[in-house]
Image (tube, rainbow, N blue to C red):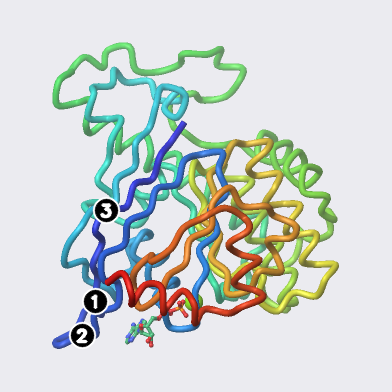
Amino acid sequence: MATLEINGLRARVAEEDGERILRGVDLTVESGDIHALMGPNGSGKSTLAKVIAGHPAYEVTEGSVTLHLDDADVADIDADLDEEDYSWELLELEPNERAALGIFLGFQYPAEIEGVTMTNFLRQALNARAEEREELFEDEADESETDDEDAGYDTSPMEGPADDGEIGVAEFQSLLKEKMELLDMDEKFMQRYLNAGFSGGEKKQNEVLQAAMLEPSIAVLDEIDSGLDIDRLQDVSKGINALRDEQGTGILQITHYQRILDYVEPDRVHVMLDGEVVKSGGAELAEKLEDEGYDWVREDAFETA
Ligand code: ADP
Ligand code: MG
């Protein structure tokens, strides 16, 4: 079980006199839990997602983003692990290293890439991640251990090379099939170019598929519900629930509207205002926000400040 722990996080736009956006964010998300992060436009939700992912447009001035892992999260790692291999300060890592540790970030505006099919993209992403992950943990382990004379096959050579971390085509295809079934997706989808000519709803479904393939410990989904009609919203929601229920992914679901929370029931709801999480509660908090807006939260936060 993984825990993403954000403490006193402050960040600003990475340029001279850049605007301060995050003003002390505290938030903890465990695998298997769904947390909704709500808040008015401009409150800093997307910035938080991007800072977690390591976006270079922002500079962290204070605080920490720590990922705590347990044995199950590193079951695929061959090396002998030390205590420090179970806790990672994400702010010290590159974006791809954060991803390799099990953080998934879905983008509010996914890029279109002409000429790259979904299948190629996903297989490359899986392979790159596996390689990065191996390096990350090996670098740590290498400091205490130098013995690599056993390197080579640890399974039968008939199963393919075991030492290059490559996910073969057959293995990839069967994983893909399994995940598409899990998400109830049409197989035709896979031959399409990555997001090019996809409808808004298809892009969002694609994002969920990527998360299903990568099996992250924690997924940050930024407004995955924006612009979806009701059928697509239900499809995407079903996918998000499957990520949690079937893969134990912890989800930080960023949303401006309560609507998706009718289908993806959050364990906790947090409200962000002016770069701070000013209120947290259960699912009923989202309903109250839908009925009454954000003004009362602002008044509450002001009073106690
Ligand atoms: P939300 O996702 O809650 O709508 P954002 O995190 O996108 O909010 O933005 C929060 C505030 O920070 C906004 O006022 C936005 O204009 C500003 N902001 C975000 N990113 C940048 C940036 N790269 N450069 C300048 N201002 C930014
Ligand atoms: Mg946003």
Give the CA distance from mark 2 to mark 3: 21 Å
Q: Is residue 56 left or right of residue 249?
A: left
Which element is circle 1 on?
Answer: strand
Task: Name the residue located 57 percent from the left edge and 24 percent from the top edge.
Answer: 160
Residue 280 vs residue 237, the one in the foreground: 280
Q: Residues within 10 Å of mark 1 (few under 14, many from 20)?
A: many
Q: Is residue 262 visible?
A: yes
Residue named by callout 3: 7
Amino acid type of disc 2? Gly
Amino acid type of disc 1? Arg
Residue named by callout 1: 12
Residues at marks 3 and 1 touching, judged by CB atoms closer than 8 Å: no
Which element is circle 3 on?
Answer: strand
Residue named by callout 2: 18
Q: Is mark 2 within 8 Å of ligand 1?
A: yes
Which element is circle 2 on?
Answer: loop
Taking the image as four quarters, which one is ligand 1 found in? bottom left
Amino acid type of disc 3? Asn
Residue 198 vs residue 232, the one in the foreground: 232
Foreground mark, 2 or 3?
3
Locate the C terminus by quadrant.
bottom left
Residue 260 vs residue 113, the one in the foreground: 260
Q: Percent x, y for residue 222?
A: 54, 67
Residues at marks 2 and 1 touching, judged by CB atoms closer than 8 Å: yes
Q: Residues within 10 Å of mark 3 (few under 14, many from 20)?
A: some
Q: Is residue 198 visible?
A: no
